[in-house]
């Protein structure tokens, strides 16, 4: 029996589980697929305040998000790092004075300390102007942060597990019913089909796009709250520019898109915003969305972005709180927490909306709402100063750690060392331990993915299939062949059945 059961292994569910177990609650978390397999791995990978949300007067949300940028950077400097954004001035859209005023507010609303502020660029002289059309002569440059979104989820789950939480991916909650003052959950292992019963004093529904399904189908609760599913799609193309800054482009339809350096050799472009009515598990980028992103980017880049340049697409569904906004891009990104706690009955908290940037604050708010039902929730918040696994090094020391490990392992390419430190931080030492050559890291599965890393992901991060490794724990799927991916999947299945198998 647990104090708290969490349904949903995305960023909100894992963040709540981590916070609760750190306050002394016994916690179990269920995720029907792999961790971060839904919305939380399909974001634009930004830790940001949301500059455009200022136009919708969401000042509380923007301020909270801006304050979180440096908090998360300090918690996980291996997977969160600063990124400068270039906003070209388009004379036919928002006026320059309005952009400058918005950025002044953006610079000062959230207590910025280490991130540099806004500056004006002359695109005829600055390298940021080189890939753009000649008509763009002035831009504003400001700061936000980048994050490896799916790794942020997994590291929250890992930290929760190391503090005593039970994390059960690929486990579906079939029913949840109040019985004898407790929640009684029937859960099913999706690999074996085996079912068992778990009891908990309190329940959190953080199922993301499936939050309404859990409410009405699993828990059979009456709810007047609505969820608005909004699809966001992205495209990845070969690298479009040489510098390491990102672009934010205004479009004639009043939307914005980003063009971001991605995985060293690529550029990520996104996102779209449109209502979605299908099964969230089936979402994928449509040809219409791909064409929209190519056209929007081509309005700015000197060399047009064409469909045949797209090497990968991904799409996710944002489970926004339905506030009745007329357009998908105008629906609030703020989170809404609803509490169902009939007199004398165990409570259920449901999470609607939210941004990856504010997941930690959302978790604190969730526990605050549960303080009358979960005694541990009355304890003081603690996560703002607690680093995530592998993040126990100073913010600016990434290069020093890479250089030190490269010296210790001279037979391992420095590019691999750099990738491992970026993904695992100080835990890269465990993967590289004793390695004097690549052969010491075991079988090579393609790109620079080794058996040592794969076994680490299986043992420490719940990876059980090739797609878990290639598209969520990393993005090496961009670099391996289908045959290599198939061989990796076969290896992982055999290794799971016989952990010491080669």
Image (cartoon, rainbow, N blue to C red):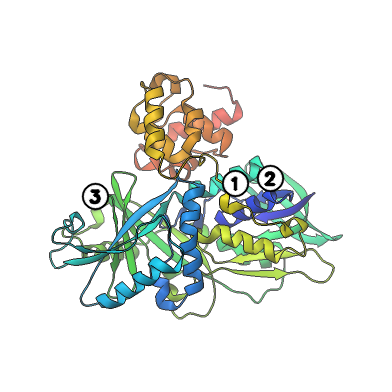
Q: Which residue is mark 1?
A: 157
Disc number lying in front (1 or 3): 3
SS at mark 1 in the image: helix
Whether label 2 touches label 1, CB < 8 Å: yes
The label on residue 243 is 3
User: Does any portion of residue 3 appear in the rendered image?
Assistant: yes
- 171 to the left or right of 463: right
- 458 to the left or right of 445: right
SS at mark 3 in the image: loop
Residue for point 55% across, 54% down = 11
Dot 1 alpha-carbon crowd within 10 angstroms: few under 14, some 14 to 19, many 20 or more: many
Query: Reading the chain from its start, which is encountered first: label 2 or label 1?
Result: 1
Dot 2 alpha-carbon crowd within 10 angstroms: few under 14, some 14 to 19, many 20 or more: many
Q: Which residue is mark 2?
A: 165
SS at mark 2 in the image: loop
x, y percent for residue 429:
48, 29
Dot 3 alpha-carbon crowd within 10 angstroms: few under 14, some 14 to 19, many 20 or more: few
Q: Nearer the viewer, residue 473 or 121?
A: 121
x, y percent for residue 453:
47, 31
Res. 251 image quadrant: bottom left
């Amino acid at each position: 029996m647990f104090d708290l059961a969490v349904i949903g292994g995305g960023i909100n569910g894992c963040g709540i589980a981590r916070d609760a177990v750190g306050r002394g609650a016994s916690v179990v978390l269920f995720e029907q697929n792999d961790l971060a397999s839904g919305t939380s791995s399909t974001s634009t990978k930004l830790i940001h305040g949301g500059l455009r949300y200022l136009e919708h007067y969401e000042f509380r949300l923007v301020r909270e998000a801006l304050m979180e940028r440096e908090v998360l950077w300090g918690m996980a400097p291996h997977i969160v790092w600063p990124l400068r954004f270039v906003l070209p001035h388009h004379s036919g859209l928002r006026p320059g004075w309005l952009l400058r005023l918005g950025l002044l507010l953006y610079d000062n609303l959230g207590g910025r300390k280490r991130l540099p502020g806004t500056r004006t660029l002359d695109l005829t002289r600055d390298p940021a102007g080189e890939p753009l059309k000649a008509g763009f002569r002035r831009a504003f440059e400001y700061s936000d942060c980048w994050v490896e979104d799916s790794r942020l989820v997994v590291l929250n789950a890992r930290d929760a597990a190391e503090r005593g939480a039970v994390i059960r991916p690929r486990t579906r909650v079939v029913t949840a019913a109040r019985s004898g003052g407790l929640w009684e959950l029937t859960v099913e292992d999706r690999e074996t089909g085996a079912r068992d019963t778990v009891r908990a004093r309190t329940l959190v529904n953080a199922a993301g796009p499936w939050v309404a399904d859990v409410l009405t189908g699993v828990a059979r609760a009456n709810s007047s709250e609505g969820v608005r599913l909004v699809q966001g799609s992205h495209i990845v193309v070969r690298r479009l520019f040489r510098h390491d800054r990102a672009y934010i482009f205004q479009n004639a339809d009043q939307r914005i898109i980003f063009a971001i350096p991605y995985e060293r050799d690529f550029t990520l472009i996104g996102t779209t915003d449109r209502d979605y009515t299908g099964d969230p598990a089936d979402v994928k980028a449509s040809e219409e969305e791909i064409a929209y992103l190519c056209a929007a980017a081509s309005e700015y880049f000197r060399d047009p972005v064409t469909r045949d340049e797209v090497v990968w697409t991904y799409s996710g569904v944002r489970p926004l709180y339905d506030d009745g906004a007329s357009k998908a891009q105008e629906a609030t990104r703020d989170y809404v927490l609803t509490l169902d706690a009939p007199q004398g009955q165990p409570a259920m908290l449901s999470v609607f909306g939210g941004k990856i940037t504010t997941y930690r604050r959302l978790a604190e708010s969730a526990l605050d709402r549960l303080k009358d039902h979960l005694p541990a929730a009355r304890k003081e918040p603690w996560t703002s100063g607690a680093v995530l696994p592998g993040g126990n090094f100073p913010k600016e020391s990434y290069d020093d750690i890479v250089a030190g490990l490269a010296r210790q392992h001279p037979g391992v390419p420095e590019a691999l060392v750099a990738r491992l430190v970026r993904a695992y931080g100080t835990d890269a030492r465990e993967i590289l331990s004793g390695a004097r050559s690549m052969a010491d890291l075991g079988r090579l599965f393609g790109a620079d993915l080794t058996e040592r890393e794969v076994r680490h992901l299986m043992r420490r991060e719940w990876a059980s299939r090739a797609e878990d490794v290639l598209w969520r724990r990393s993005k090496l799927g961009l670099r391996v062949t289908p045959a290599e991916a198939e061989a990796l999947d076969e290896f992982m299945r055999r290794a799971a059945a016989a952990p010491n198998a080669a």
